[in-house]
Image (cartoon, coloured by chain):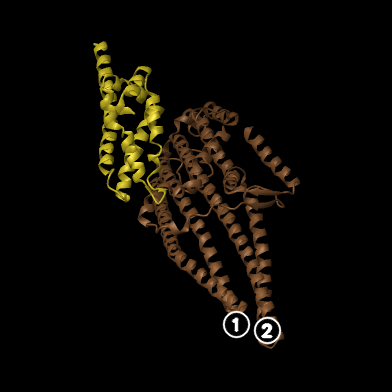
Chain colours: A yellow, B brown
Amino acid sequence: MKRIFILMIFIVNTAIAQSDITSMIVDVSKLKIEAEATLGATPYRAKEHQVIKNYFVGINEFATQIRDNSRTNRRFNSYLSGQDMAKFCSETLINIENWNQIKTNCTRNRFFLCTEDVNEYPDSKKIISETLSTDLLQIFKNTPECE
Amino acid sequence: MRKIILAAIFLISGQSWAQTNEEIEINLKQVVDKVSTENYTVYQTSLRVYQAKESITVARMNLLPRLNLWKLASAAIEIFAGGPVGAAGGAFSIVEDIAPFLVPANWFRVSQTKLFYQADLEGYKALWANEVLTSKALYHHILLDSSLKDHILKSRNDLEKIYRIVRVRETFGGASQMVSQEIKIRLLALEEDLRALEVLISEEESLLGFMMGYPTGTRLKVSSIEMPDYDSLEHLNYEDFDFRAVDVSPEIKQFQYFIDAADYARKEVVYSFLGASSLSRGLNGGIFDSLPVQTGLGFGTGASIRIVKTQKEILKVQKKAVEETVRRSLNLLVNNYNLDVDNYKNLKNRVYLAKNGLKQLYQRIEFGENVESLQLIESSRNVIEAEVALFSVMFRFLNSEDKLSRLIFHGDYAKAKEALKRMQEEEK
């Protein structure tokens, strides 16, 4: 009886942990969809800037959270082990072409006018890759969607 | 220890400069670098940031038990001799020392000091940028004033030429005595302008030297800079810059950290019945020090909470005011920049016409024609005024661009991250 109770607690705990990570990823992917929809709406005004900022701040916070919180890091790795890496990357990471497009659209009169988080995007991606286990990192590096 | 060594190096380097009196040639890049590392105000602020960082460690370490022998002794007496509240009272009185981590207010203070440290970092960034802006503006002014000086020297030579012509005419009866006097007065006025400019340039160089951390007496020579292609400059649009200026402003971010810290100050009041914290909030925490935190659950707690909430509202209003100030500065800057873009073409044309007019008068004199002396003076004055106005606009462009870069942290101001990183490395 005691063992069953402990096992149940473990299962519930794992389920909650997985749902936490899933909800974090879902949040980021929603922000990504909005940012990509805004990408071509030039010249960017406050509304577009805010949408773009939301995504880049979101991905940065996500990266920082999985780096700084060892428990979240473990959960993230465990989540990715059961997931398709290409699907994860395409849902959460803006590809390099779109990022360059955003950077170009952010520049007017030789001034960069978007949030600084746009420029810090490669750092966020690097943080995410650094939190991965060796096996997952290898898959991450070999997946074109994650470049 | 590392800080002490750095401070010693800072002072020794100052001394070594003091002993030399040679002219130092500087460029804009060096201005930015030296202001970042050796400006007195920037260095002082970096030390304050260091204090704020160490305050986090103090607050965190103070969560651990500490030994207060007198308090232990008085608690023991209370327990054994039966004090006002007996053994329990004696035991609880030493909780704050034996187990300060049990006092929630202490945890809230740790969270506050972390936020104040972040606020200090933003404050450092703002101050660094302002010092760089002022130094660069000084550099531009030295260049402008030097150009004006050269221009006045040239104008004086031209006027002396006119003076000689007029004197010849007066000798042969072709002009009245009044004209040469009028020219002489203008020549003397130009001499005064020259002397005033020399003093001004010297003062500007001295101030720039101070801002770069050079000791008094160091002679600086500013290198010329590459001027922008003024003809290709276009109007700026306020809406383009509005988001970035507000988003990147360290002054606004600093207020946001204070607002976040206000939440912890409120929790501190709410949980004050579990004990008040005696930990310091650090330098910036002064804004919350006057808030009434009850030392237990009393009738004043409700009012204390309302006061903290109001404090948060005050901070929000202040943040909004800073936002509006940033926007207003940007708007003013864009308007002036656009005005200068429009005026530049006019001024260039004005200089061309004025110079042409004077040239024609000289040609007429060379051909032996009778030219009114006053007309010659007026024409020369037009050239001087037009050229001075053009120079001023050209350098105003440089300052406007730099102010804009400061507002949106572009160009040299993008080095703020490096400056922060360097400061944080020095702290370690």
Q: Nearer the viewer, residue B103 or A130?
A: A130
Where, quadrant-wise, is the C terminus of chain B in this rendering? top right
Q: Name the amino acid, label 1.
A: Glu
Question: Which residue is rendered at x = 43% and y = 44% of the image?
Answer: B257
Q: Is residue B79 above or below residue B409?
A: above
Residue placed farthest to the right in the image?
B19
The kind of secondary structure element at disc 1 is loop
- Cα–Cα gap, marks 1 and 2: 12 Å
Q: Nearer the viewer, residue B268 or B299?
A: B268
Q: Is residue A11 left or right of residue B118?
A: left
Q: Which residue in the structure is indicated by mark 1?
A: B369
Q: Quadrant of residue B111?
A: top left
Per the rendering, the mark at residue B169 is 2
Q: Nearer the viewer, residue A85 or B29?
A: B29
Q: Is residue B56 visible?
A: yes
Residue placed farthest to the front in the image?
B367
Q: Is residue B341 above or below residue A119?
A: below
- The label nearer to you, 1 versus 2, is 1
Question: Which residue is rendered at x = 67% and y = 77% of the image?
Answer: B163
Q: Earlier in the sequence, mark 1 or mark 2?
A: 2
Image x and y of residue B358, in percent: 57, 74
